[in-house]
Amino acid sequence: MEHDDSIIKKNKETDPDFEQDQILADDTDLNRISEELKPQNSFKLLSISIVVASVIVGSSIILAGRFRPSDGMLSAKAIAKIEQAVTPEKGVVLPVVWGDLGKRLVESGVIDQTKFEQLYAGRGGIDDSTKDLLTGSNNGKLLITKGNANLLLNLLWALGLGTKNEILEKGEMSDPRYGGAGKFASTGGWTLSRGAPMQHYSAHALIPLTPEQQKLVDEVSRNIYRPCCGNSTHFPDCNHGMAMLGLLELMASQGVSENDMYKAALAVNSYWFPDTYLNIARYLESKDIPWSKSDPKGILGANFSSSAGYQAVLKQIQPATGSGGGGGCGV
């Protein structure tokens, strides 16, 4: 098999915008599949050694048969270095201005301020900067850290739940075969509202979108998965999915590019599921692909970020646990 560098050099010669390393397959058949895939200018790292003809359905079976286990274990120092790349201690600034959205969520009743503050009183309380996110009018860009990942998860969950959007009204959440949108964890599990959560489901014009912005949210949401289940953000049946939908709506409304939407989404998912993305990064490192060179869209897809995709990745490495953080599946 050709060394990665020769493939990268070839891509750089034919595509001057090429900046992302390609993840290459480890057996002849997957090399052939990789060669048949055309690199795209926006997302250079393709869906890799685990991409196959039909993808999502049966992906875990395919992955288990195709991956070759990584050799050995990384040292604690090496793991700590990877963790710092995936979830930096200083946090990641997200490309969105929060403004007065927290205040509007409280005023509309999607968030009951008393319930919210009582919840966090049992978790050490809310400092002034955090309270500003809930009640202020001039908040700047959001910063996600290990310390506030859960709080941002809940704020964005409320935003995704309460914002009027056709994905909630016409998408999988409202499919009659599931028994109604109120039966999901992302709706019934939201216990921090005034009144029943379904009173606020897609009920408030918090983030108006143009048709082009709505189309972008729809497209991107279908490509972002979460390791707690097998659904994309377009089917936000859990808190992480609903929160991600809220973030995508906010980014689209503020003119964030599609590429930067994926970057921000990967950063957020990494803080919400730190051990998951630490292990995905370790797998990539075993293939000589540093986290900084990975393609956010590829990593967020079903082959890595769905529950089945991640379980397949785990079979190739010695799983590691990071220093904590993240957010669970409830408030």
Image (cartoon, rainbow, N blue to C red):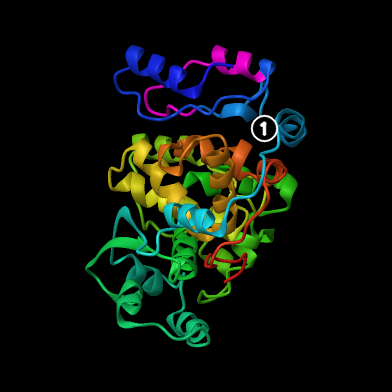
The crowding category of the residue bearing disc 1, from other C-alpha atoms within 10 Å (few below 14, some 14 to 19, many at least 20), is: some
Q: Can you give x and y, in whole percent of width and height, for residue 9 in the image?
A: 38, 18
* Residue at position x 54%, y 58% in the image: 274
Q: Is residue 258 above or below residue 160?
A: above
The residue that disc 1 covers is 56
Q: Is residue 35 magenta?
A: yes
Examine the image and state in which quarter residue 12 appears.
Answer: top left
Q: Can you give x and y, in whole percent of width and height, for residue 137 in the image?
A: 24, 70
Q: Can you give x and y, in whole percent of width and height, for residue 136 in the image?
A: 27, 74
Q: Nearer the viewer, residue 239 or 42?
A: 42
Direction from residue 190 to residue 244 in the image, left or right: left
Question: How many numbered marks appear?
Answer: 1
Examine the image and state in which quarter residue 105 appears.
Answer: bottom left
Direction from residue 301 to residue 253 in the image, left or right: left
Q: Nearer the viewer, residue 179 or 251?
A: 251
Q: Is residue 197 above or below residue 194?
A: above
* Residue at position x 48%, y 64% in the image: 153
Q: What type is the residue that disc 1 sits on?
A: Ile
Q: Which quadrant, please, contains the N terminus?
A: top right
Q: Is residue 172 magenta?
A: no
* Residue at position x 35%, y 76% in the image: 130
Q: Can you give x and y, in whole percent of width and height, for residue 180 in the image?
A: 68, 54
Q: Nearer the viewer, residue 106 or 118?
A: 118
* Residue at position x 50%, y 59% in the image: 80
Q: Nearer the viewer, residue 159 or 290?
A: 290
Farthest residue toward the left?
138
State the extent of the magenta-drawn residues as a range.
Answer: 30-45
Looking at the image, can residue 39 be seen? no
Q: Which quadrant, please, contains the C terminus?
A: bottom right
